[in-house]
Every structure is written in C-alpha cells, then in structure tokens.
Amino acid sequence: SQQGEEDPQALSIQEGENATMNCSYKTSINNLQWYRQNSGRGLVHLILIRSNEREKHSGRLRVTLDTSKKSSSLLITASRAADTASYFCATVKNTGGFKTIFGAGTRLFVKA
Amino acid sequence: DAGITQSPRHKVTETGTPVTLRCHQTENHRYMYWYRQDPGHGLRLIHYSYGVKDTDKGEVSDGYSVSRSKTEDFLLTLESATSSQTSVYFCAISEVGRADTGELFFGEGSRLTVL
C-alpha cells in the first residue's frame, strides 16, 4: 500500500479562503514533500520538510510535520482560482536507494 | 524547466505486444524514476534507478522491466502489454542523496492505451 494518504480526496472553496490538505504515512521517513499537478501536466515540486523540522513556510504555503503522528498538512492561504489543481504529498525513505512514494492526492477547486 | 523528455508521448497498442517508453534527461541527475498514474491511485512507483545499471523495484513492478545503460536514459519496457497497463506514465529525476533535498523533476508524461 502507499506510504502517503491525503485527506480530503477533493476540496472546493471560494477564492480568498484558506485550503488545508492532510497527509498521513506509515513508516519512518527522511523527508516529506508536497507537489502540485495541473490537469494533463507533470507534477511540480512545492515544498520540502525534513524529518527534524516541524513547520516550514514558502509564500502562501505552510507545511507542518508531526513525526509522532506520522502526518503532515499543507495550508494554502488566500487561495486563488489559479490554485485549482491536484496536490500530492510524497515521502522519501532511504531503503538502500532513496524511494519517493506518493499518495493518491487531493483535488482542489477554487471558485472565483 | 528541467531537461526531461519522454517518448513517445502517446501510444496505442494491442494486448500482447511489447512496448518501450524512453526517458531522456540532460541534467546529469543520478536518480531516475518511472511512475504510473491512474484515477484514484495517485502516482505509483514502478521502478527506479540510482545509477547506471543500478535499478530497484517499486510498488507495482510486476509486468515491467527497466534498463539504464547511460546516465541520461532510463527505459521502461512492458514485455507483453495488458489492458491493466493502460495508464499515464511519468518519468522523474532527482539528485536525492547528495544534499538530502529529494526534489523530483517530472516529465510531461506518456499516455499508453492497451486495447
């Protein structure tokens, strides 16, 4: 089964509202990352948080990591219609080689 | 944009035929990955490579093989395609391990339909 699982599967909000997506994982990790995918395109890296970090910010993005609960959250503040996309968490684990495993994603729709 | 090229971008084939997808990078990154993306499953790791001739299995490796004879090329082969392998395939590259950044750069995907 997959390392990361996102919640909710889909989220619809109004422009200007905040969007929160959650990710849970099962085993120890080296770091956790969030990616964005626009329809029909490849994924684009948003932010990385290391296992010894608890919170990280990048522009309108805030990521938290709770290794004791094996969970992470991505907050997008003041959302815009252009934020409409799918968002994926990914965990990186050193198993001899570095495997990057993705969750099923959250589909975010921001209404203008 | 990272220099990653996937080919072909679209392919329709019949059950039982062999298929090879190619991923070519110009970044000299050590790690290369093949994922498949299906509705409701997100991205699932098929195989990955951490150097020339060094490969390992991912979550869904059955029915797939890979080869990496040069740093820049990572080939994914379906020896005998089945309808369950209809999917969008993404190649990704990374320098993870050198600076523990682990950021993946993705290609634009290859859409494969097996009839």
Image (tube, rainbow, N blue to C red):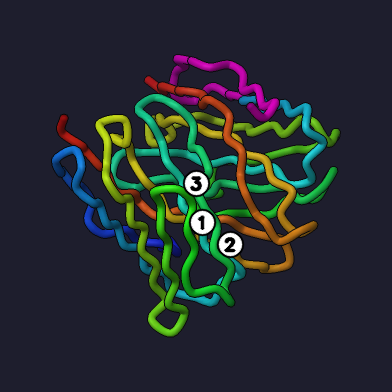
Image point (56%, 49%), residue name? B61
Nearest to the eye among marks 1 and 2: give it.
1
Q: Is B33 situated above or below A1?
A: above
- Which structural element holds mark 2? strand
Which residue, given by chain and number where applicable, does mark 2 sit on? A92
- Which structural element holds mark 1? strand
Category of crowding for the residue at label 1, using alpha-carbon neighbours closer than 10 angstroms: few (below 14), some (14–19), many (at least 20): many
Q: Which mark is residue A46?
A: 3
Q: Amino acid at mark 2?
A: Val
Q: Chain of mark 3?
A: A
- In the rendered structure, are the residues bearing label 1 and label 2 in contact, judged by CB atoms less than 8 Å apart? yes
Q: Is A85 situated above or below B14?
A: below
Q: Quadrant of residue A29?
A: bottom right
For residue A69, side relative to residue A110 (left or right): right
- In the rendered structure, are the residues bearing label 3 and label 1 in contact, judged by CB atoms less than 8 Å apart? yes
Q: Position of residue A43 (x, y in %)?
A: 48, 37
In this rendered view, identify the residue nearer to me: A4 or A65: A65
N-terminal label among 3 and 2:
3
Nearest to the eye among marks 3 and 2: give it.
3
Q: Amino acid at mark 3?
A: Leu
